[in-house]
Image (cartoon, rainbow, N blue to C red):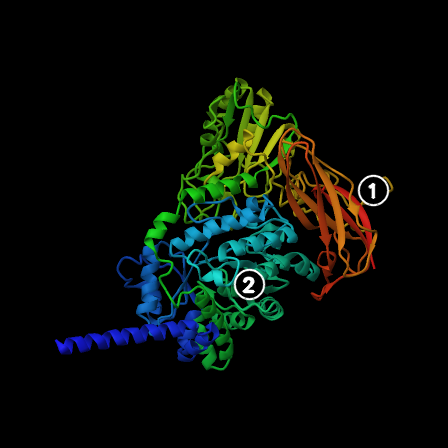
Amino acid sequence: MKRTIILTLLIMGSYAHAQKKKKMKQQEPIETRIEQLLQKMTLEEKVGQMNQYNGFWDVTGPAPEGGSAALKYEHLKKGWVGSMLTVRGVKEVKAVQKIAVEETRLGIPLIIGFDVIHGYKTLSPIPLAEAASWDMEAIKKSAQVAAGEASASGINWTFGPNVDVSRDARWGRVMEGAGEDAFLGSKVAEARVKGFQGETKEDLGLPNTIAACAKHFAAYGFVEAGKEYNLVDIGMPTLYNLVLPPFEAAKNAGVRTFMNSFNTLNGVPATGSKFLQRDILKDKWNFDGFVITDWASIREMINWGFAEDGTEASLKAVEAGADMDMESHLYVYELAKLVREGKVDEKLIDDAVRRILRVKFELGLFDDPYRYCDEKREQKVIGSKENREAVLDMAKKSIVLLKNDKQLLPLPKTGKRIALIGALAADKTSPLGSWRIASDDETAVSVLEGMQQYTGNRLGYEKGADVTIGSVSFIQEVQINTTDKSSFEAAKKAAQESDIVVMVLGEHGFQTGEARSRTELGLPGVQQELLEEVYKVNPNIVLVLNNGRPLALPWAAKHIPAIVEAWQLGTETGNAVAQVLYGDYNPSGKLPMSFPRNVGQCPIYYNYYATGRPIDKDNNVFWTHYSDVEKTPLWSFGHGLSYTTFEYSEITLDKESYKKGEPVKASVTVKNTGNYDGKEVVQLYVRDVVASLTRPVKELKDFQMISLNKGESKTVEFVLTEKELGFYNSEGEFIVESGKFQIFIGTSSSDTKNSVFHLY
């Protein structure tokens, strides 16, 4: 008995000592813990931290016995894997984490990555749609919902936000970003990073936040001809003034990882660009997180002709500053050999591993590797009522009213016959959009379901025409219906017998996103013909657009009295659209990208340069224009109507001239002159009239969202500093020059009041 008591006391003492030692260890500075761990690691284990594998076997089943899966499994057990992606769900994540933590020599936990682009299970609008809200708190909340669900499912790292500025609607990945403007894009980048990660670095250790990843570094939005995986060839002023600001904003917001891009930049693949990854990101910006490659982009440098083989590609990537290899399978095979041969300095390996370990420590994975593996939380959080309410709010705020000439909107709630037409109106999958790989098909509220909740009118539905043919898939080309018009007559009959027609037309959710470049930007397939046929029998049409990019719709813009840009709004699509159509929510969204008149205008954007011949002065053809179409957009950046109207006063400046460093104070009074309460995004633009480099005709520099009751007025004040008045030169130096400045304040980039001041 005495011996048992003594043994028990010894065990308890040993356990208490171990717990005390563990607690003391946790209290040591992260940098100290990183260095202590680094000293214990073999070269192969260091390189292993730089290796990321996609999920490669059923982790809850037996271990793989052959092929590449078996080899990857062996690497995992050796501690040669630092991260895995697309493993999701508490049960699965816990299984792979258990191998890394309990079966490897050093027990270094994995960081689990996933593409949480616009939600996990409960989906928000696509990011381009969210940017149309111009509501940073709503965007931040949307990212918080996504982080909450993803972290509850075992994930602790998202490959978002995409902060690529893009002016070309042909590029399918415009749906992932915030549009064409660097200032708006920077604000959205900051909001999404803080939504994913929390407000401070300490928040990253909470179980409901995840590490964010700013991508694609850099200039992916400028791929030539809007073609995926293509080259980028732009001037340095464009890089510094348009491409980089949202990335720097993400860095300043605390983003912990960057992803390099698939494109070249002026002849160098981004993955092999020391200029981008070391000179700018890690040195100039002092970024201390880590850089991950995009999928297999190290290996793809061979295809670019930038590296002869995998050995040279690995050498160039690591020297350039790419810290983690996503699915190229090269670092794990090449780097240790390159170090031993003296071709790669081991200090580069150590630097990359420090960065990766730092983020793992910040996430709290070393203190509790299973902190994201709570099955009860997983069941409680995912798909919760609170999450659905949040994404519904985001969806309503993302809708843009493009046109409302006959005041067809808002729809009357009683006494009308309404025909709802379009296959997309009843679709419960397409509105989920692209990049929703954790969600489930048929889980969106359709527009039909949303409108059916309003029972005061007689609502009838007709498909009109299918958008696609056969099954659709994230990894296959979408086949578009270009011939089947068999349901046209039923749709026309329904329209003819109705007072108002609501037509839901646009793109399927998988027509945008990665590898979805298009050379035609009209309504796909037979939808344009359907629209025109229905118009012949009833012109009282409300066109509701479901799309992931700006479309070219000149016929609709001319003929259709009411047009609503409803994007792909995610899980609560139908409820959001119905509430806007019936006036229970007054739309306040503004376009984050210009809509072209036709694809030949692309890329088109508001902040263009005047050129040497901006207008026709001599009544001849020798000026910058097209001979077959206006050079202006169909709908410009910042455009968006309301069910009410707003009147702007002239701009008031506190004085006419300012010294450098002195704040410029401008104000305008906005009055709600309509019959509804509403919200307005008041936008401020600036032009540096004469500068050492030619400057755009105007650039967004601030905006404020205000709420006004009908009849109410409010004075909106702006303060401009040197930050808003300067620009980057070709060497990346930020400069502020004296001279004349124009200031514009208004409801869109093309509808403003203007004034002038001088800086000296």
Closer mark to the observer between disc 1 and disc 2: 1
State the image quarter where residue 320 is shown. Answer: bottom right
Q: Which residue is mark 2?
A: 304
State the image quarter where residue 748 is shown. Answer: top right
Residue 358: % across, % down: 47, 69
Q: Is residue 614 left or right of residue 294?
A: right
Q: Which mark is residue 616?
A: 1
- Towards the viewer: 80 or 12: 12
Residue 752: % across, % down: 74, 41
| Residue at the left extreme, as displayed | 1
CA–CA distance between discs 1 and 2? 44 Å
Total residue callouts: 2
Q: Which mark is residue 43?
A: none
What residue type is disc 1 on? Asp
Residue 384: % across, % down: 40, 44
Image position of 495 with respect to 361: above or below: above
Residue 697 appears in the rendering: no
- Towards the viewer: 155 or 14: 14
